[in-house]
Image (cartoon, rainbow, N blue to C red):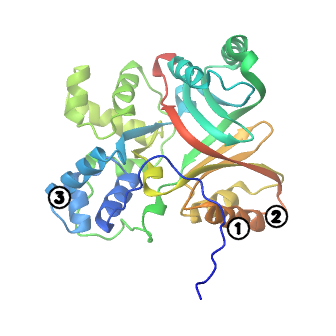
Amino acid sequence: MQEKKSFVGQIYDLPQREKLDNLDKEILYLLSINSRFSLSYIGKKLNVSREVVYYRIENLKQKKILNGFFTIIDSNKINLKITLLCIKIRKFDNFNNVIEELVKIKEINRVQACGGRWDLRVFITHKNNDEFENIFNKLMKTYGDLIHDYVVLSIEKEKYLGLKLLVDRKDSFKKQNYRINKSSFYKELNVEISESGFDETDLKILEILQHNARINIKEIGDKINYSRTAVENRLKKLTKSKIIKGFIPMISLSFLGFQWHKILFKIKNIDEKKFLSYMKTLRCVPWYMKFKGDWNYQISVFSKNNAHFYNILNSIRTKFSEEIITCDSLVVFNQYKFDINLTQV
């Protein structure tokens, strides 16, 4: 007699799911640690030629699994604040047109369509509270009739925790017989110096790197008329001071069968280091945020299915049962924009 299987729920993604072999996963994982690792370094690490690594990366791009390489910039350190606006939509007649219009607004650096309590998440970049109020009031004047409810959350901190979900192990870079390429700035990203400031040339470099994290240093120098050494020294300063926090791949994890969830927490008397340390142990949690507002914290979760997501949420609520007042979750269907408009600085 066939065993009866219980249905636990599944949100089906539109794209065709792709099956990757171990080598593809290992390459993506190393790129998720530092997208500026050279082809030669990745090849030595995985015991394959640089040509094989190049071919695999190009193949992942063609399949739309890998969509480029992004530089994580700490907006606070270049005097920009980011505020999250979560919106419940009243009318969906022109929803797609609204998203297209929001994407074009330079002060908006992220736009996400969601399911759950909120339908839309808009991240607004601004220098100060007055500038935010001005942008917010313009949005309300333009789209107020479409909005049923909203909440404003000021982002105090956000941290990339890595894509450990791609492999079933922890990597080590302490003992190996080959050097990590200097142009990855891996060493500089793992030390921190006191604030060193930035100038217009640094902003030009950040603008070039933001959506092209693997660009050659010489190419950057050619674009801004600086020598390779001058650009390299500036990048060392930007990474050591943590204006640049990392170089990451833009991976369509939905193509690999993962669902993207956000969990918002309202927490009291929490040991933030303990909370963050626990999040780092969860392989499916690549991103963490701390807010001012109705919610204290948020994590991104990429789960295999709803049962997997339930187990993750249950483990967090069990671990911090005394501290968590309440939590809320939503599904992210699509992200239409992800950048920082550096001309605002």
Comparing 89 with 30, the one in front is 89
Question: Label 1's element?
Answer: helix
Quarter where residue 144 is shown = top right
Specify whether 108 is left or right of 65.
right
Q: Is residue 262 above or below residue 235?
A: below
Q: Residues within 10 Å of mark 3 (few under 14, many from 20)?
A: some
Question: Label 2's element?
Answer: loop
Tell me the number on the disc at residue 52. Answer: 3
The percent coordinates of residue 224 (x first, y second) are 26, 21
Q: Residue furthest front?
A: 1
Residue with the mark numbered 2? 321
State the CA–CA distance, disc 3 to disc 2: 48 Å
The kind of residue on which mark 3 rests is: Val
Q: Residues within 10 Å of mark 2 (few under 14, many from 20)?
A: few
Residue located at (40% from left, 67% from top): 171
The kind of residue on which mark 1 rests is: Ser
Comparing 167 with 341, the one in front is 167
The kind of residue on which mark 2 rests is: Ser
State the CA–CA distance, disc 1 to disc 3: 40 Å
Quarter where residue 118 is shown = top right
Q: Is residue 21 above or below residue 146?
A: below
Q: Residues within 10 Å of mark 1 (few under 14, many from 20)?
A: few
Residue located at (47% from left, 62% from top): 164
